[in-house]
């Protein structure tokens, strides 16, 4: 595949969902089925086009291309390497499954004519983030995604949703201003903000430290990093479940992706190590891991528990990034994939439970494994992966991160991972054990041999085939990309770490 074709495909991948947004808004007037079909088709086309870039990436290809200049030395540009390809492919894959899931889930909801265009526009903005060729382009798409995601958060338009949306919007504005200030400083220091020129800042300075902190605030806010996580536990529970899955599974990763670019394309690795700036991220990551896990224990609402769990899990990625060695970066990159599969499964399964039964309290989920065996089976599989049970993908993430910590002579980080895994078990096992080994509420006195009654309830309670297919595919990924031979996702993660630590070459 030649370079010109790849560039055209990248532009189409970013612009197609954005162009389709007004089309979906127009089609909404005539046919809901056509609107839903076009949304799924757009997501599917975006995913397929992204996968078609793989041969170019497999051969070690890297592209940096200016699209148009805004001001002297300031442009909108695109960049393709193994990191951007991996996250763009992950994003479009999860988006496709959530779009399929939404068809039945949103059938009971209001304002679908607003939901689907916003859902697809946000996909385009996320792809724009991953393919951005400079910090300014990254900032533009980052802000587009952040602002439009506000509409998904307040979709229910309840008082709780509006309050959560307001908090999210305030934090987004703060993060956006910090990010913009950081971009300006880097432009002043290096005379460029391009991600394709190698490292921009290689010497320590007070101005450089200020820019680094600005990036930590801007990208760390989106990644749910302590103490900037305060918007996340309120936003995820009030959003529609497919939107919650995308917020946690993909949109939080845009913050982590931004920090990856900062650590390897803006500042040199040697500078970060010698100055100790990476330790700032490490300390915040450890607090994020332990705080998120501890507070998740106290939450009775299933989606709030999952939201705090997401905070903790993003801390794993940030911790691996801060260690700055091969195994740690491999583990951090792989956990981006692992968490996307695990947490998307959990949020979609939780959404199916709420959609079918109205149950949100984890203490009321006794016997749900008998009534919704596929849904709860997938939920349990993803929960065990989150705990780190082998051979699931969550174990492989934590194993590789632990190796990275030991390689760096930091066994304390391994202890943090072990404590977090224990806390994960403490807030997931009380959900899945009663779901399969206790009777549903109000059936404690039912006859154990009344199989016909349970069969009838199973038919009534289980989610729809479209919803189950999306949940099951994501759950299956926790097995396929665990301790299995020819694990393509883990191989991509290793190649990404080699590429980043090698200064942009294999």
Image: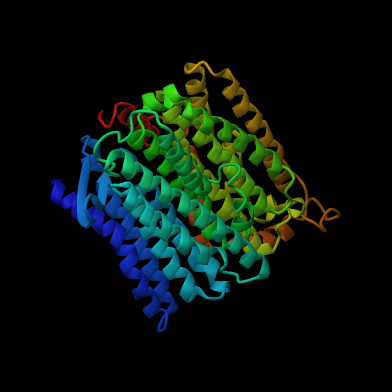
* 358 on left or right of 15: right
Counting every numbered tag in the picture gives: 0
Q: Quadrant of residue 451?
A: bottom right
Q: Which of the colour schemes (rainbow, by chain, secondary structure, one colour) is used?
A: rainbow
Q: Residue 346 appears at what percent x and percent y? A: 58, 49
Tell me what residue is drawn at x 70 percent, y 43 percent.
295
* 191 on left or right of 422: left
Query: Image height check: is 62 above or below 322?
Result: below
**In the rendered image, is residue 485 in sight?**
yes
Tell me what residue is drawn at x 48 percent, y 39 percent.
213
Residue nearer the viewer, 140 or 354 = 140
Q: Spot the residue most to the right.
A: 445
* 260 on left or right of 370: left
Residue nearer the viewer, 449 or 126 = 126
Q: Residue 473 appears at what percent x and percent y? A: 47, 49
Q: Spot the residue most to the bottom.
A: 30
Tell me what residue is drawn at x 21 percent, y 55 percent.
67
Q: Quadrant of residue 485?
A: top left
* 406 on left or right of 120: right
Residue nearer the viewer, 448 or 350 = 350
Tell me what residue is drawn at x 47 percent, y 62 percent.
147
Q: Residue 105 appears at what percent x and percent y? A: 55, 66
Q: Residue 95 appears at what percent x and percent y? A: 43, 56
The quadrant in which the C terminus is found is top left
**In the rendered image, is residue 459 in sight?**
no
């Amino acid at each position: 595949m030649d370079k010109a074709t790849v560039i055209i495909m990248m532009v189409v991948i970013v612009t197609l969902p954005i162009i389709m947004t007004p089309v979906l808004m127009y089609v909404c007037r005539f046919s809901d089925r056509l609107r839903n079909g076009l949304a799924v088709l757009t997501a599917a086309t975006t995913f397929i086009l992204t996968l078609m870039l793989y041969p170019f990436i497999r051969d070690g290809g890297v592209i940096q291309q200016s699209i148009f200049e805004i001001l002297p030395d300031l442009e909108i540009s695109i960049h393709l390497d193994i990191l951007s390809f991996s996250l763009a492919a992950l994003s479009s894959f999860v988006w496709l499954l959530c779009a399929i899931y939404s068809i039945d889930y949103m059938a009971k909801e209001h304002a679908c004519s607003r939901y689907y265009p916003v859902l697809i526009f946000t996909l385009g903005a996320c792809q724009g983030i991953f393919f951005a060729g400079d910090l300014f382009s990254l900032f533009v798409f980052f802000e587009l995604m952040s602002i439009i995601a506000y509409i998904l958060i307040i979709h229910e338009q309840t008082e709780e949703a509006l309050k959560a949306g307001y908090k999210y919007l305030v934090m987004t504005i703060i993060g956006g201003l910090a990010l913009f200030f950081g971009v300006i400083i880097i432009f002043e220091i290096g005379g460029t903000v391009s991600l394709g020129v190698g490292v921009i800042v290689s010497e320590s300075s007070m101005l450089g430290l200020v820019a680094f902190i600005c990036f930590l605030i801007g990208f760390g806010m989106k990644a749910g990093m302590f103490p900037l996580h305060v918007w996340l536990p309120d936003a995820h529970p009030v959003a529609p479940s497919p939107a919650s899955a995308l917020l946690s599974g993909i949109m939080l990763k845009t913050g982590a992706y931004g920090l990856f670019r900062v650590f390897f394309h803006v500042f040199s690795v040697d500078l970060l190590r010698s100055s100790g700036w990476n330790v700032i991220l490490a300390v915040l990551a450890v607090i994020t891991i332990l705080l998120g896990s501890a507070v998740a224990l106290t939450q009775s609402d299933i989606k709030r528990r999952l939201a705090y769990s997401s905070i903790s899990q993003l801390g794993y990625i940030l911790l691996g990034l801060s260690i700055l060695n091969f195994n740690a970066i491999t583990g951090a990159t792989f956990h981006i994939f692992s968490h996307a599969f695990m947490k998307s499964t959990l949020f979609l399964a939780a959404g199916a439970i709420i959609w079918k039964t109205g149950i949100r309290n984890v203490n009321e989920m006794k016997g749900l494994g008998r009534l919704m065996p596929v849904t709860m089976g997938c939920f349990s599989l993803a929960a065990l992966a989150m705990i780190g049970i082998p051979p699931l993908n969550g174990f492989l993430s934590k194993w590789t991160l632990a190796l990275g910590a030991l390689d760096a002579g930091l066994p304390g980080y391994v202890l943090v991972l072990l404590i977090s895994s224990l806390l994960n078990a403490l807030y997931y096992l009380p959900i899945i054990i009663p779901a399969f080994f206790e009777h549903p509420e109000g059936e404690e006195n039912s006859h154990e041999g009344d199989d016909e009654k349970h069969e009838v309830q199973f038919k009534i309670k289980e989610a729809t085939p479209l919803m189950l297919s999306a949940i099951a595919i994501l759950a299956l990924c926790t097995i396929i990309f665990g301790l299995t031979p020819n694990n393509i996702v883990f191989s991509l993660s290793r190649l990404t770490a080699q590429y980043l630590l090698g200064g942009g070459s294999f």
